[in-house]
Amino acid sequence: MQHPILDRVERVADDVVSLVLRGADGPLAPWTPGAHVDLALPNLLTRQYSLCGDPADRGRYRIAVRHDPLSRGGSEYVHLFLREGRTVAVSPPRNNFPLLPAPEYLFLAGGIGITPIAPMLRAALAAGATARLVYAGRSTASMPFATELAAAHGDRVRIVSTAADGRPDLAALAADLGPDALVYCCGPDAMLTAAEAAFPADRLHVERFRPATRTFAPNAEFQVHCARSGGSVRVAADESMLDALHHAGHPVPSGCREGVCGSCELVVLAGEPEHRDDIGAAPGTMYPCVSRASSHHLSVDL
């Protein structure tokens, strides 16, 4: 973990604050657009936030947090109790939403979903690509960084107030795309679902803050062999693999416990995992917070 100092708290939209974290002991770990960090809060909660500042600034991280009164307590603590000058624990950045090279990009953001998209837009333009952003929210007052992005990038940025103008026409945007363009989208479920219907799957990249609703086969019991320790752990049908490993004395770092952050990634050495995450686990890996086994046994590097 890194231990930067909370240098500045700034209100950037209705119910949204920006936090600037300054490295206390030298440069912070490097990151690329689309990356996020785990923020370990003093109330013992750990939450994931996308980095929305400048990757070239190794001295500071910037994140933005929307106050959600129905959340599990992380955003409420940030808004009501976290103060400038406090040292916080922050993980090294992880990137499950990387910006791939392309000559043209369409970026779609909804509300707080602008946080991973903003540095992507800057990086794409700096690389000489053709890029535009369609940024939607109920009103401009609810949309963090809307004024900042419009001022910096002019007509490359289109701000859409859905209360006044309705939702963006994604089918029209899809029809206007060049043949080699990539689409990056982050926002509420309704926007992601519409994007998945409008754009070809091989050109669309999305990041979810909440797992998609899906149906899986009923849970079955299986065994996990921990190759490094030599132990074997039974995973009951009514518990997660992550919890079973923890209860057996094999704790795995974890964050969201919903299959969207990637902090609990394990290397699979043998057996067939049943992937239930929303990241798209790389071959030979799995996320035990939600994923299980298709085979009766798994062997993992633990």
Image (cartoon, helix red, strand yellow):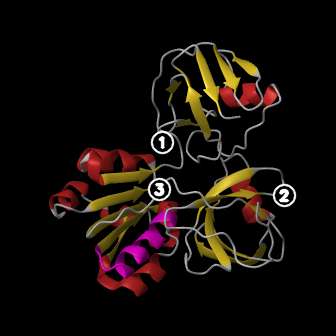
The spot of residue 282 in percent (x, y) is 48, 42
Q: Magenta region, mostly helix, strand or loop?
A: helix
Determine the secondary structure under disc 2.
loop
Q: Are marks 2 and 3 in contact (CB under 8 Å)?
A: no
Residue 291 in view, yes or no: no
For marks 2 and 1, the one nearer the N-term is: 2
| Boundaries of the magenta span | 115-130
- At a point 83% along the width and 77% down the height, the residue shown is 85
Residue 206 sits above or below residue 8 on the image: above
Q: Quadrant of the N terminus?
A: bottom right
- At a point 50% along the width and 72% down the height, the residue shown is 141
Answer left or right for 23 relative to 149: right
Residue 17 sits above or below residue 204 on the image: below
User: Viewer-proximal residue, 3 or 101?
Assistant: 101
Residue 81 belongs to the span the image colors magenta: no
For marks 2 and 3, the one nearer the N-term is: 2
**Residue at label 2?**
42
**In front: mark 2 or mark 1?**
1
**Residue at label 1?**
282
- At a point 38% along the width and 81% down the height, the residue shown is 126
C-alpha separation, residue under disc 2 versus residue under disc 3: 28 Å
Q: Quadrant of residue 289?
A: top right
The spot of residue 299 in percent (x, y) is 63, 25
- At a point 61% along the width and 41% down the height, the residue shown is 265
Q: Label 1 crowding class (10 Å Cα cut-off): few <14, some 14-19, many 20+? A: few
Determine the secondary structure under disc 1.
loop
**Residue at label 3?**
97
Q: Are marks 2 and 1 in contact (CB under 8 Å)?
A: no
Amino acid at circle 3 = Phe
Q: Quadrant of the C terminus?
A: top right
**In front: mark 1 or mark 3?**
1
